[in-house]
Amino acid sequence: MTTQQFLTSAWTWNPAVLVFSGVALAAYAWAFGVNRRIVFLIAGLGVFVLTLVSPLNALAEGYLFSAHMLQHILLLLIVPALLLMSLPRCISLGSRSSLLANPLVGWFAGVGAMWLWHARPLCNAAVSSQFVNVLQISSLLLLGGIFWRQILAPREEERISPAGAVLYLFSACMACSVLGIVITFSPVSVCSIYAQPPADYLGILNLIQSDWGITPDKDQQIGGLLMWVPMCLVYLSGIIAQLARWFAHPVATAPVTDKAL
Amino acid sequence: MNGNTSITATVAHLLTPAERQHWKLAWLSTVDHKRIGILYMLTGLVFFVIAGIEALLIRLQLMVPNNTLLGPDTYNWMFTMHGTTMIFLVAMPVLFGIMNYILPLQIGARDMAFPRLNALGVWLVPFGGILLHFSFLAGGPPAVGWFAYTPLSETPYSSQLGVDYWAISLFVLGIGSVSAGINFIVTVLTQRAPGMTLRRLPLFTWMIFCNSFLVILALPILNAGLAMLLIDRLLQGQIFLPFGGGSAILWQHIFWAFGHPEVYIVAIPAFAILSEVIPVFSRKPIFGHEFVAASTVIIVFLSLLVWAHHMFTVGLGHTIDLFFVAASVLIAVPTGVKLFNWSATMVGGRVRFTTPMLFCVTALLQFLIGGLTGVSHAVAPLDWQTKNSYYLVAHFHNIFVGLIVFAILGAIYYWFPKMSGRMMSERIGKWVFWLMTIGFNLTFMIQHVLGLAGMPRRTFTYPDLPGWTWMNMVSTIGAFFMTAASILFVWDLVISFFRGKPAGDNPWNAWTLEWATTSPPPHENFDALPPIHSRRPLWDYANPDRPDPVVPVGGAIDTFRPDKIKAGVITFIISEAGFFGVLILAYLLYNATAQSGPGAQQLDVLKTTIFSVCLFASSFTIWRSEVGLRANKQGKMKAWLLATIVLGGVFIVGQGLEYWSLFQSGVTVGLDLFATTFFTLTGFHGLHVCFGLLALLVVLGVALTGYSKNGHLPALGAVGYYWHFVDVVWVFVFSIVYLWPLLR
């Protein structure tokens, strides 16, 4: 199989993903009407669908740890952030629930989702078991939402202060970098199922290992590096946005109207 | 006024009337941030002379090919000592001195948050310096470069004591730097004058504030590496020794994880100086204050992320190189933002080329060149060709001298009037400037060419190849120009101190608060402060009809002012977390797979679990003690405190017993990698428990004297935080060292 054949054929049209996205879009339009923020929703759902039906998903299913890592980052950091940004500014995410409003809970949700799912038994199970895989995807979306809620909650008063947010994101980057460093330089396989792909059901093992040159060792390095460097750049974008919010907004507690998008 | 009375008057300034009785101790025992700042700078000046002479010897040796002035060993000593001294004993102390003097003044504070800690920091510099230089008397200084790559710096290849002195000295200096970093952070958070919100901080202070986070995060990484290097050298460990199974590359990772931020630790203060001086002599507020402020945060963030670009030639593999090429190139963006903003500040301004401005503008230009060659090093293939050549030497001297030394000189010409009450000579200053600029560019610009022509660095001599000889000659001549500039500069300092024109409060018509008091400022800094509504309070004060736009106060964060002692302990804990993080990572690296020989199975998990429960329980007891204090129940508070000490003591005794039984069964520190990393990690944790116990005993002693009668004992809360931290570290260590092997 060539790369081109692979990229055109390896789409997994998962009905659950498509139905979920369609329902989410319809529900949003029904609840909030079609406004400018729906762009974020469409972007978020688009990334969600692409993550789970494109050849990336085929690679993550037993072939490449690094593809799995990319999925992980997209589902934990990009999709929930975009979904939160799509909510109208008047929505409250339940500030009465003190547990979710606690920044420490948010921080541990975001960082914990990274550390926990890379414990070897869980990481392997997420590939070999369909049920654990679904559990993983939903937990990533949920925990990512709890993490970003501190920063991107629609209501200004439910967010942490900009300077606090900078420290929040900075320390989250440090915590994930450490895991990235561990994975990059680990002498043992972190997710051993990727070290020996069980069955080459797509017939692309040769393509990956000789044409692309990605051996299992390199694969794990790329996975670790994805978490170490580009993932931190996602946090960095958040930090830049928070600095802009701090320096630009004359009064940080002023109510922001929906039009001020 | 004739000369003699003027000199007497100046000297009289140095001491208050009350201090004349005990003048010998007045400066040695000072805790005043202004005097400490000056002590920092004077210490830096002394070491600048020493490291400068070393640089001259290097240049004299390289002046002609096949020179025999210095032998290979002496040459290696010289460039090691030159690099180490210039960074740790010149650039950092001098910059810390300037920050120490100026930062509290700029925020309208009386002093730093922790004056005694400040005095500790300054005195650790000469002690560290003496330790380093004592190696000259103990068999010869280190000859391993300022980076001390292993295994060259390990006992089999450097058996003299030089490297040990080098490592211990840097460890001491690292502790001093972290203490200064903590102090700057807490000072900015807790000592600001009313109205000085976080968003109204002048850029200099803001950038030092950001930079201090880098100091407390980066220095502990080096200290953890130095601790492991010393364990290798003194206790026969093999952490960095390949033939014992260790990894020499691990040292490079640790060193550059510190070393790359370190470059920014000395460069950001230089940026801070430029951001202060350029607007004042352009008679304009800085262009895009917010962008300069925000880009500093981004530089701090990125600088911690990209150290591997120092290691492209190690052979980490294309995969790793690729990621770090991309991330390293990114740093050019926030630094570029700064360059453009400084330039835009000058555009349309009424630029006055005084000596400080000349130094700062030239620093900007030279930094542009150094920055561009820096970006060229982010490209791995080019880096492979040039890393070990004089092209790299030229690059980093463009940063360290072209930017940092020039900015420091600009800062001293700018703030000397405030510190001494007298102006420095503009006439001599211009001579210093031109000699320095010509000398610097003669010395280092030509080295770019030499490097591209293939001349390797770190080599004591070179053959007579076409072009090399005259270029090296030019470089050496340039070094002498710089020497002349330095001598003239010191001369200017001395005569201006005694005979300079009186400066007045605000000779440059600047806008920040340090110019709102007398020159030199009185001991308590300010009699009264002008109102603060913007980033340029003195401009507003002088131009009430057209003040700067008010920087609004929005939300609690702008006026954030935490408890001083707790803020201090928390910043300290952040820094300690970095230290333990490195030790834990090193343990993980060597124990990820089960080793042959004694390993984790030798440990008595059950016993240690019991002792660990004691330690974890002590977190509960110290919390109860704090509850007792808050309710003002003295007996309860003391009883729970005592219980904490007993539980902590039981843990330490338990750890001692475990060590004893391991020694009995032949498991010593140097036995194998498991033993070395095990003893390093648990040993440093045990050391921290011991320090915590000492602190708890002190608190208990203070409580027993009845000091806490009114329910006021702030030290308890601070020690409590520290104690919880030590327990949390043990949660990690216990899980990784004891529980994890059971799961495998």
Image: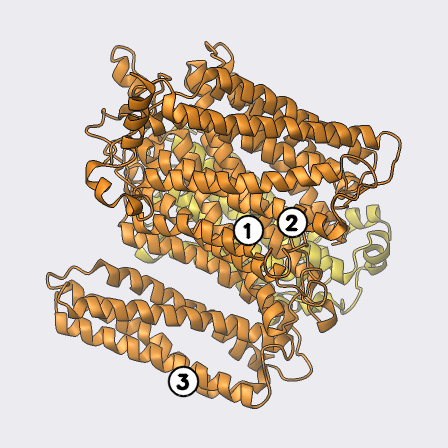
Q: Secondary structure at mark 3?
A: helix
Name the residue rendered at 49%, 73% in the picture: B683
Q: Which residue is mark 1?
A: A20
Q: Secondary structure at mark 1?
A: helix
Chain ID of residue with mark 2: B
Q: Which residue is mark 2?
A: B80
Rounded to the nearest angstrom, the CA distance separating label 1 from label 2 is 64 Å
The kind of residue on which mark 1 rests is Phe
Image quadrant in which you'd find residue B640:
bottom left
Q: Which chain is yellow?
A: A
Residue B583 placed where, x, y %? 54, 65
A60 lies left or right of A133? right
Q: Nearer the viewer, mark 3 or mark 2?
A: 2
Residue B610, disc: 3
| Residue A1 vs residue B26, the one in the foreground | B26
Other residues around mark 1 within 10 Å, as few (<14) / some (14–19) / many (≥20): few
| Residue B61 vs residue B268, the one in the foreground | B61
Look at the image and give the colour of chain B.
orange
Chain ID of residue with mark 1: A
